[in-house]
Image: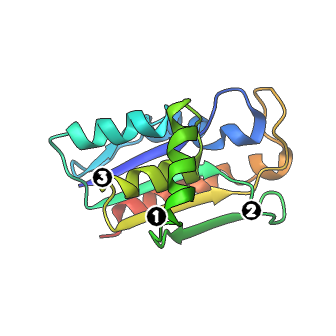
Amino acid sequence: MVLVSGIGYSNLGDMSFGRVLLSTLVEMDWPAHVHVEDLNFGPIMIYQTLEASPVKYDKVVLVAAAKRERQPGTLEVYRWNGILPEDAEIQARIEEAITGVIDLDNLLIVCKHFGVLPDDVTIVEVEPQTEEWGLEFSPVVAAKVNEAINAVRDQALAM
């Protein structure tokens, strides 16, 4: 089973990339082994949801925006290495996650720490240009929407 989701806040410009794309991903025709779910809530709640789920996923594909000091609009597809930081950093991420912060890195670290992520986690990630309040993407991020949707589909169907 494959879990697909878009991660991000609503109405936060480019940082809403994953959440906005999720609405398209949900409407797409997927085979039975691919489940698209909204995971746009805090990482602690996501961990609890995945832990309680009767379905155990073999693969997770997430789409999001993340600031990594790349050229704005850069789209990267990569397999997350699953390496956790030191215990103090994990604890800091859990503390932040308890407040409900929606953040790709927090989600990955918290869920991996609690053992609810499979080894196969693929990220489709765009570098944001803006984090300003609003409904619109910057032009460089808007230009990556179709490419990102295709990348999510390709990754979800690759087994």
Residue at the disc numbered 1: 122
Residue at the disc numbered 3: 116
Element at label 1: strand
Give the quadrant of residue 68.
bottom right
Name the residue type under label 2.
Arg
Residue at the disc numbered 2: 68
Q: Nearer the viewer, residue 25 or 101?
A: 101
Q: Mark 3 and mark 2 in contact (Cβ < 8 Å)?
A: no
Residue 119 in the figure: left or right of residue 124: left
Measured as percent of width and height from the top left, residue 116 is found at: 30, 52
Name the residue type under label 1.
Thr
Element at label 2: loop
Measured as percent of width and height from the top left, residue 82 is found at: 44, 69
Q: Mark 1 and mark 3 in contact (Cβ < 8 Å)?
A: no
Q: Nearer the viewer, residue 147 or 141?
A: 141
Measured as percent of width and height from the top left, residue 63 is found at: 55, 51
Classed neighbour count for the residue bearing mark 2: other residues with Cα under 10 Å, few (<14), some (14–19), many (≥20):
few
Reading the chain from its start, which is encountered first: label 1 or label 2? 2
- Report how far apart the C-alphas of labels 3 and 1 lie in the structure: 15 Å
For discs 1 and 2, the disc positioned in front in the rendered view = 2
Measured as percent of width and height from the top left, residue 95 is found at: 54, 40
- Colouring scheme, one of rainbow, by chain, secondary structure, one colour: rainbow
For discs 2 and 3, the disc positioned in front in the rendered view = 3
- Report how far apart the C-alphas of labels 2 and 3 lie in the structure: 25 Å
Reading the chain from its start, which is encountered first: label 2 or label 3? 2
Q: Residue at x 48, y 55 (%)?
A: 108
Question: Which of the image's four quarters has the N terminus?
Answer: bottom left
Q: Is residue 159 above or below residue 117?
A: below
Q: Is residue 26 above or below residue 107?
A: above
Question: Which of the image's four quarters has the C terminus?
Answer: bottom left
Classed neighbour count for the residue bearing mark 1: other residues with Cα under 10 Å, few (<14), some (14–19), many (≥20):
many
Q: Nearer the viewer, residue 130 or 97?
A: 97
